[in-house]
Image (cartoon, grey):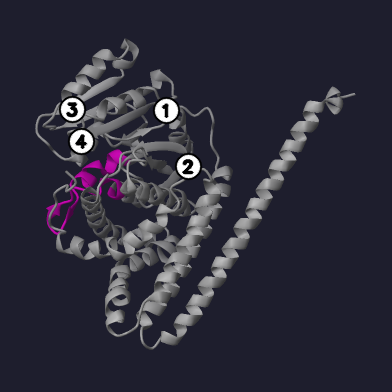
Amino acid sequence: MDARAHSPFVAISSAKVTNSQRSQRFKFSLLIFFALCILSLIVLIKAKTTSTLRENALLFFYGIFVTSFQLSRLAGALLYQRKAQQDFIKPNYEPYVSVVVPCKNEEGAIEKTVLMCAGADYPLEKLELIFINDGSTDNTYKVLLNVKKKLRPEFAQRLTIINFEKNRGKRHAMAEGFRRAKGDIVVQLDSDSYIVPETFRELILPFADSEIGAVTAHAEPENAEKNFWTKMQAAYYFVSFRIMKAAECTFGLVLCCSGCSSSYRKSTVLPILDQWLGEKFLGLPVTWGDDRSLTSWVIRRGYKTTYVENAKAMTVVPENSKQLIKQQLRWKKSWIINSYLTSRFIFRADSFFAAAYFFPLAIITILTPFVAVSALIVSPLQGLWPLYYLIGLILINSLLVLYYRSLSPGNRFWPYFYAWTLFNTFFLSFLLFWAVIKIQDRGWGTR
């Protein structure tokens, strides 16, 4: 007779599992109920706006288009969990890994980045760290040398420091890291970012699949609690990674493996390294958008790109409006250039993804500032207030927030996603116009 049949501990354990399952089912039922309520309200709002179709056809059709597209992305994100569980992963897969970190003027943050990388949960004999000082004008290089002296010998010998006396740009620093790397896999980090040590292995495991060319981690702001601006970005980052990139991951084509925390198969990158490094647009070198561009080159070569929720990365985000706007302007310039370059091959890579996701996303991004002008400026001048437009905007984002809450109940930044939505609608969307005007200004812009 099985002794466990009379064990009170087994009975209690079973009860706990049952209660947990009931709780999960109840939460899921609530999620479905609220989602259906929001969908009903969205349909009602769209029905109301039908009466103004003749007055503002652009606003009406744009609303229908955006709503449908956002719902499709949400559906893609819902499929991510199942796809991730079905992916074949070899738990004992341990290739040699090189961590490459370009840095410029990061004397205050670079020591922590080195220590966190050195503490990665990965066999030390299969790990190397390469830090490239890209012409810093502060004490970044001295800090790197001092950190190496303080490390235990077995760690210090794994750390290579490359010093550029003159600034060459992030792409050149990254390229030098790729060329020097001994690893089969290259982990690319920003100088103010790191992979949470105990999740480092998660960023490597997907490469057991020979079709994977690049992997991006789930990044969160380390300085999220600093102020309103950082809290708003914390909410945006969660949605951007766990919903948007997760949706792209269901196609096996994440469009941008984030520069702050991604990994690449070196054999995939080396053949196109010089082309990526020498990339030009309108006759001038492209000095930003290195992550989005490198991801596009990987996809162009026929490899899959993916997102791994369990690989956790921490990064530092802008702490004031001036820094944030400069960053967003740089990102929009990068988006313009790389969307054009990607559009030239994406149909060959995956025609369904191109038609169902890439081009609709591009169209929405281009139309958004024009629609915002129409809804928020032109229509009020004509006596038509954009009430339904704004309500519809809040409702569709409420679906994202609802899913956000179900994925991370303990995350306290979800209300700030509404703030981000309004900030994006009333201000950031218009940056696309300025990005077009300033597209030939290839300065970095943040500092």
Marked residue nearer the N-terminal end (4 or 2):
4
Q: Which image quadrant for residue 7? A: top right
- Judged from the image, the secondary structure of the residue bearing numbered disc 2 is strand
For residue 309, which numbered disc appears in the image?
2
Q: Residue at x 12, y 36 (%)?
A: 167
Image-based side of 187 in relation to 147, left or right: right
* Residue designated by label 1: 197
Can the viewer see residue 157? no
Q: Is residue 299 above or below residue 224?
A: below
Residue at 38% from the left image edge and 46% from the top image edge: 234
- Tell whether label 2 touches label 4 (CB within 8 Å): no
Q: CA distance from mark 3 to mark 2?
A: 31 Å
Q: Which residue is mark 3?
A: 140
Work out whether mark 1 precedes mark 4 in sequence or the reverse, and give the earlier one: 4
Residue visible at 27% across and 25% down in the picture:
111
Residue 17 numbered tag: none
Specify the amino acid type for callout 1.
Pro
Span colored in magenta: 269-293
3 or 1: tag closer to the N-terminus: 3
Q: Tell me the quadrant of the picture where the N terminus can be found.
A: top right
Residue at the right extreme, as displayed: 1
Q: Is residue 401 above or below residue 71?
A: above
Q: Which residue is mark 4?
A: 173
Nearer to the camera, 78 or 12 = 12
Q: The residue tagged with tag 1: helix, strand or loop?
A: helix
Whole-angstrom CA distance, mark 1 to mark 4, is 24 Å
Local secondary structure at mark 3:
helix
Q: Do callouts 3 and 2 mark residues in contact (Cβ within 8 Å)?
A: no
